[in-house]
Image (cartoon, rainbow, N blue to C red):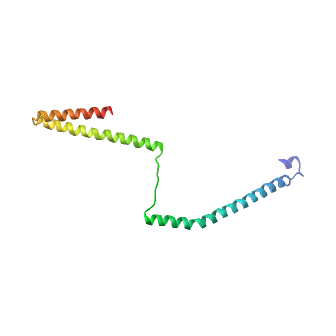
Amino acid sequence: MSTALDPAFNAWKEIQPFAEGIFSKQGQRSAQDVLAEAIRLLRLTVQLPVQADTFLSRALAGQLEIRAQLSESSTGDLRRIENSLARLTWALVFVALLICATLLLINGLQLAGTICLAGALLTLLRTLLK
């Protein structure tokens, strides 16, 4: 479009100083980055055998420590699972006492059947209220 307005105008010639400035800054930055990365890799190369030796000696001696921490959402989920498991356990106790009470009452053992039925009702109440 610029050559249609002025055929003697060369856009590339006008852009050249800016492009040279950008490339020279990038060249300096990349050289500094390469040097910093080379220093970092050199340090890592020197430290790695020492770290590996320390790790392996602890592993062979059985002295490795592993630390893990649950997130807040996982802790809440775990708490809900524990509560559900506790309710399920009490529900199973209720069912077992109810079956025992039924069998005892059918076989004519009124006192033992009534005691089991009372225990079943107490466990049912505990299960429902907690």
Q: What is the tally of numbered marks visible in this picture?
A: 0
Residue 124 pos. (x, y %):
26, 33
Q: Residue 119 lies in what quarter of the image? A: top left
Residue 62 pos. (x, y %):
43, 63
Judging depth in this view, the residue of 117 and 7 nearest the camera is 117
The residue that appears at 77% across and 56% down in the rendered structure is 25
Q: Is residue 71 left or right of residue 123?
A: right
The residue that appears at 55% across and 68% down in the rendered structure is 49
Q: Residue 129 lies in what quarter of the image? A: top left
Residue 86 pos. (x, y %):
32, 40
Judging depth in this view, the residue of 72 and 67 nearest the camera is 67
Q: Residue 33 lies in what quarter of the image? A: bottom right
On screen, residue 82 above or below 68: above
The residue that appears at 30% across and 35% down in the rendered structure is 127
Q: Is residue 84 left or right of residue 106?
A: right
On screen, residue 36 above or below 107: below
- Quadrant of the rendering where the C terminus is positioned: top left
Residue 3 pos. (x, y %):
86, 50
On screen, residue 120 above or below 19: above
Q: Is residue 115 left or right of residue 37?
A: left
The residue that appears at 24% across and 33% down in the rendered structure is 122
